[in-house]
Structure formats: C-alpha cells, structure tokens
Image (tube, helix red, strand yellow):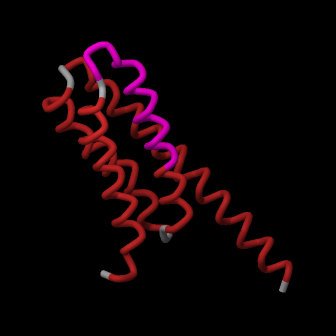
Amino acid sequence: MKKYSKEIIVFVFQVMVFYLIPFTAGPTDGLGLVVVIWFATLLLSIVFGLVSQKKRKIIYPFVVAIVFIPTVFIHYNYTAFGHVIWYLIDSYLGVGIGSLIKMITDVLSQKKR
C-alpha cells in the first residue's frame, strides 16, 4: 500500500475536485466551474503522470471519468454526461504530459551522471 501512496493522494484530490468544488459555485457560475474543474483535472493528471508507474497511468483517465459520473446526478443534470468524455480526454492529455516530463527529466538526469 505504501508504494501506491502518491497515486492515492492524487486520486483523493481528484475526487475532492469533482465532489466539493461544485458546492462553491452559485447558480450562474456553470462555465467557470467547468473551467476550474477542467484545469484541476489536467493539473492532477500531470502530477499523476509524474509520480505513477507505467501500467497505472493507462487506467487513471478511465477511473477519473467513472468517478465523475455520479456527480452528474448529485450536482448537475443529464446534459453534463458529455463532460465525462472531456474529462477522459483531459486526463489522458495530462498523464501524457506528465509522462513526457518525467521521461525528459530522467534522460537529463542520466546524462549528468
């Protein structure tokens, strides 16, 4: 369990973003809420790409999309189901960026040795 602690922390923050941030938005703050959650998901996915091992990186975007589905019933209406795809794409983009940054830093650190 200890070797998964970084991934679990990132995932807990992702769940908090999906379930707690909507409580801070007013009835007219819909677009701003979507943008904030989108950027938070991108940032957390980049962090996940940096700290995670290879096999878990592939699963994370699917888990993010699945975790978002119950929020449609809690905070939004049925029209928010389209956002599941956007968060899946956003997570894949973030994990890809994080993995690329990790790969570049690993190569640069090996060159210094």
Q: Going by the picture, which residue comes out furthest to the right?
A: 112
Would you say residue 28 sits in the magenta stretch? yes
Give the x, y percent position of residue 113: 84, 86
* Residue 74 relative to residue 1: left or right: left
Residue situated in front as seen by the camera: 92 or 112? 112
- Image: 113 above or below 49: below
> Which residue is depicted at the point 26% across and 41% down?
20
Q: Quadrant of residue 75?
A: top left
* Residue 83 relative to residue 107: left or right: left
- Image: 106 above or below 71: below
Give the x, y percent position of residue 101: 67, 59
> Which residue is depicted at the point 40% across and 66% down?
7
Q: Quadrant of residue 19?
A: top left
Residue situated in front as seen by the camera: 91 or 10? 10
Quadrant the N terminus occupies: bottom left
Give the x, y percent position of residue 85: 37, 32
Q: Going by the picture, which residue comes out furthest to the top?
A: 28
Q: Quadrant of residue 37?
A: top left
Image: magenta residue range:
26-43
Would you say residue 38 sits in the magenta stretch? yes
> Which residue is depicted at the point 80% across and 71% down?
108
